[in-house]
């Protein structure tokens, strides 16, 4: 490995890989450093898809959408706490980011929806497989093809500055060997801190004892790295709990199951809320149930269209039965109540109007095709909306809101885009949009230093 690079990318999730590819394509010499033994970070676990409005794939399907509506719905979902400039940049670049991927052989041309969005704008792989694995394998293929240098099992321990500019990074590998690499710029793409329960509870004491859906590398180390060189942070207490997590394994049950037509019922066999509300609201309703859990219920129609469902069956999460009555009995639920719930919901689908809870999206099909399926779920810590402060050029800002020269950040490590609640499908959009922007700006910065 050479001892100097134009751009060092810290982290190999979606943001880091997109940044590395873009910086390379603009002529920079790039090194990716990943502390875990494998690529992909938390991105590899992403399930729903990538949100974007006014895309080619929406047009093909005749879906009418607008960037403005996407902006407004994301802002509403984030309770108006989103940084407006970052959000505007996000929405504007989203369709280009879908094309950026397509140009690199990563096609997200199947479209569904997630909670808080009124239009189908969540782009997924066509075969119904989860977005994360598909995305990471496609990005890694692009990294490999370009011969970009990668160090796995290696952590960035410190970013060094000289004359107020980023000048080097100090690395340590799994054999405790340290190495200092001279750099012109660094892109920190280290993800969030959902798997660092101490840090989560420090900002949110109410989240003590919650499981997390995240991989164990999501410890927030990148935030500390940047704070050490003066970075400011924003929204650190804004931590998302995802409503549908299998509690024995901390495995996330994708929002795309509800997006495909599933409902949520409580132990009494009743629906209790609009399943397609935003994650914060659905989670709060489940926590407020006396049993603090719920069941996600779907039929064969939904299963057949979503590969994730088969995975949940293989993992033993799913209780299945040939009839609704038998399913209720297996779940220890009053079957009269459960049958009445299904009948009433199926009526709502027929009328395309939910007079109980006002669900307006994904009223797709009546739940009437056996076998019938249920997964017991409860909320888990899922995403940290806060992080280091960046501008729309992904430059890291200090406490005076001035750029720290040579320091860039993208993805979950950066705060401000999602406000107080991230919409499903907006994290994958975030990492590709801001990851590729970071690659562009870091490469430009490096050129200017030459
Ligand atoms: P994003 O979705 O923002 O791209 P991910 O969680 O997918 O974030 O990826 C972040 C990656 O960064 C993870 O693979 C994680 O192991 C890695 N990482 C975190 N801290 C460091 C560090 N100090 N040095 C190297 N890699 C790191």
Image: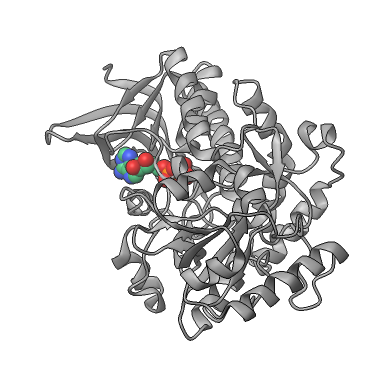
Front-most of residues 130 and 217: 130
Against 205, residue 444 (above or below) is above
Q: Name the image quarter holding the N terminus.
A: top left
Residue 6 vs residue 41, the one in the foreground:
41
| Vertical placement of residue 268 versus 360, above or below | below
Along the line of sight, the residue nearer the viewer: 8 or 197: 197
Query: What residue do we see at 39% from left, 49% from top?
Result: 315
Give coordinates of residue 197: x percent, y percent.
Answer: 31, 65
Question: Is 242 left, or right, of 314 in this rendering?
Answer: right
Image spot of residue 282 (x, y percent): 59, 71
As drawn, 219 above or below 146: below
- The residue drawn where x is 81% and y is 40% is 54
Estimate the x, y position of residue 35 in percent, counting from the top left.
28, 38
For ligand 1, which image quadrant applies?
A: top left
Q: State the image coordinates of residue 178 (x, y, percent, origin top left).
A: 16, 33
Which coloring applies here?
Answer: one colour
When asked about the image quadrant of residue 437, the answer is: top right
Q: Residue furthest bottom?
A: 290
In front of the other: 223 or 341: 341
Q: How many marks?
A: 0
Q: Is residue 52 left or right of residue 202?
A: right
- Kindly tell me whether residue 36 is visible in this rendering: yes
Left of 89 or right of it: where is 377? left
Task: Kindly indicate the quadrant of the structure image that contains residue 211.
Answer: bottom left
Image height check: is 342 above or below 322? below
Figure quadrant of residue 151 = top left
Observer able to see residue 404 = no
The residue located at (69%, 60%) in the rendering is 367
Q: Is residue 215 left or right of residue 284?
A: left
């Amino acid at each position: 490995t050479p001892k100097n690079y134009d751009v060092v990318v810290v982290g190999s999730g979606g943001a880091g890989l997109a940044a590395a590819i873009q910086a390379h394509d603009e002529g920079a010499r790039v090194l990716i450093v990943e502390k875990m033994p494998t690529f992909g970070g938390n991105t590899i676990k992403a399930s729903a898809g990538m949100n974007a409005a006014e895309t080619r794939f929406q047009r093909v399907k005749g879906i009418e959408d607008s960037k403005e509506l996407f902006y407004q719905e994301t802002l509403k979902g984030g309770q108006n706490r989103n940084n407006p400039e970052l959000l505007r940049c996000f929405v504007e670049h989203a369709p280009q980011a879908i094309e950026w991927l397509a140009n690199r052989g990563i096609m997200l041309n199947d479209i569904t929806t997630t909670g808080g969005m009124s239009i189908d704008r969540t782009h997924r792989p066509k075969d119904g497989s989860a977005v994360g694995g598909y995305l990471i394998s496609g990005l890694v293929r692009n990294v490999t093809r370009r011969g970009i240098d990668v160090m796995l099992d290696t952590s960035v321990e410190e970013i060094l500055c000289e004359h107020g500019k980023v000048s080097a990074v100090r690395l340590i590998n799994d054999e405790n060997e340290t190495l200092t690499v001279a750099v012109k710029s660094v892109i920190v793409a280290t993800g969030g801190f959902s798997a660092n329960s101490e840090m989560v509870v420090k900002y949110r004491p109410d989240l003590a004892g919650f499981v997390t859906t995240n991989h164990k590398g999501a410890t927030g180390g990148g935030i500390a790295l940047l704070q050490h060189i003066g970075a400011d942070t924003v929204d650190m207490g804004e931590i998302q709990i995802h409503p549908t997590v299998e509690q024995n394994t901390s495995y996330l049950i994708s929002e795309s199951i509800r997006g495909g037509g599933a409902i949520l019922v409580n132990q009494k066999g009743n629906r209790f809320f609009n399943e397609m509300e935003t994650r914060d609201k659905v989670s709060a309703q489940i926590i407020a149930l006396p049993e603090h859990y719920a069941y996600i219920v779907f039929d064969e129609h939904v299963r057949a269209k979503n590969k994730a469902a088969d995975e949940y069956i293989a993992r033993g999460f799913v209780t299945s039965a040939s009839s609704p009555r038998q399913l209720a009995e297996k779940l220890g639920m009053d079957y009269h109540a459960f049958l009445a719930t299904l009948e009433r919901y199926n009526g709502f689908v027929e009328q395309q109007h939910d007079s109980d809870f006002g669900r307006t999206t994904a009223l797709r099909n009546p739940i009437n095709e056996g076998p019938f399926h249920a997964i017991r779920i409860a909320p888990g810590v899922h995403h940290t909306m806060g992080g280091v402060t960046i501008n729309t050029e992904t430059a890291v800002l200090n406490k005076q809101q001035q750029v720290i020269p040579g320091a860039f950040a993208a993805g979950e490590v950066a705060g401000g885009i999602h406000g107080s609640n991230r919409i499903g499908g907006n994290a994958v959009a975030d990492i590709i949009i801001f990851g590729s922007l970071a690659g562009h700006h870091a490469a430009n910065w490096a050129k200017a230093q030459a």
